[in-house]
Image: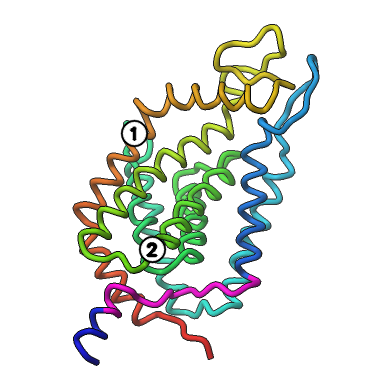
Amino acid sequence: MSILERTRSTTQPEVALPIGPRTAAVLVLASVVGLMMLCWPLLLVAQPGDRVEPPFMFLALLPLVMVVVLAEMGEGGMDSRVLAVLGVLSAINAVMRGLGAGTAGIELVFFLLVLGGRVFGAGFGFVLGCTSLFASALLTAGVGPWLPFQMICAAWVGMGAGLLPRRVSGRAEIVMLIVYAVVASYLYGMLMNLSFWPFTLGIVVPGHEGALAYVAGAPVLENAHRFLVYTLLTSTGGWDTGRAITTGIAIAVLGPAILTTLRRAARRAVVRPG
């Protein structure tokens, strides 16, 4: 192998978990279901006096979709080596999340999720996000109605990292990953806010609304404005900012070494068609 070929294999490794058309369709389905589950307050048509409750059927449906995603990816070429890498990264993320969660927004799971998705591809990142959050919930007794929301949001973070331009390398790659991690940290917080925002400040009816509360039956844009203001006031100075800073610093300090290690593992575990 020439020096040029060796450099290309290092900076642009093959995706360890390729995505076929059927798996891509299932990933889109899972994302659509997750987005509907998160955005239902903005789409709900309610009248004053109506009792507003979250669509709990989505909480049961989403884990089933996740199982289908895992099955499709297994059918598409996840062999024992890739499965072993997924298991190791999920276990590390679960332990690291238990060490950092709950302390001033310090999150130690997202930087490895971003790096794993970057090296192994969007499909691997999606699954890694799901398994990492699920494993950490079991480890910390954090299983609850919020878990499906956390799983799908983390899955999107890992998938997005795998969709970043692959030709970027060196210092530019680290800068790109830091910027992505900061943006993804805030987006993750915003989506998680959307999952519980209607119940945090109480659900009110038109004529009695608060400045930031969800108003049942109000126009979509009006409730969206209230939610964005609520997110801006609660996220920029607290948990989400801590997550963004922690993840960005971790990628800047540990990113180059971990990327090298993961890419070495990717070259050994890569799945080639045929």
| Numbered disc 2: secondary structure | loop
Above or below: residue 113 compared with residue 241: below
Identify the main secondary structure in magenta: loop
Above or below: residue 79 compared with residue 118: below
Q: Is residue 246 left or right of residue 24?
A: left
Q: Which residues are magenta?
A: 8-22
Q: Position of residue 3 (x, y in %)?
A: 19, 86
Residue at (44% x, 25% y) in the render = 232
Total labels: the figure holds 2
Q: Disc 2 to disc 1, how far (Cα)? A: 25 Å
Instruction: Write down the residue under mark 2.
Output: 165
Q: Judge the density around disc 2: few (<14), some (14-19), many (≥20) Cα neighbours within 10 Å.
A: few
Above or below: residue 58 compared with residue 14: above
Question: Mark 2 belongs to which amino acid?
Answer: Pro
Residue 253 forms part of the magenta stretch: no
Question: Mark 1 belongs to which amino acid?
Answer: Thr
The label number, if any, that marks residue 241 in the structure image: 1
- Picture quarter with the N terminus: bottom left
Q: Judge the density around disc 1: few (<14), some (14-19), many (≥20) Cα neighbours within 10 Å.
A: many
Between 164 and 116, which is closer to the camera in this rendering? Answer: 164
Above or below: residue 8 compared with residue 60: below
Residue at (52% x, 32% y) in the render = 193
Q: Position of residue 74 (x, y in %)?
A: 57, 74
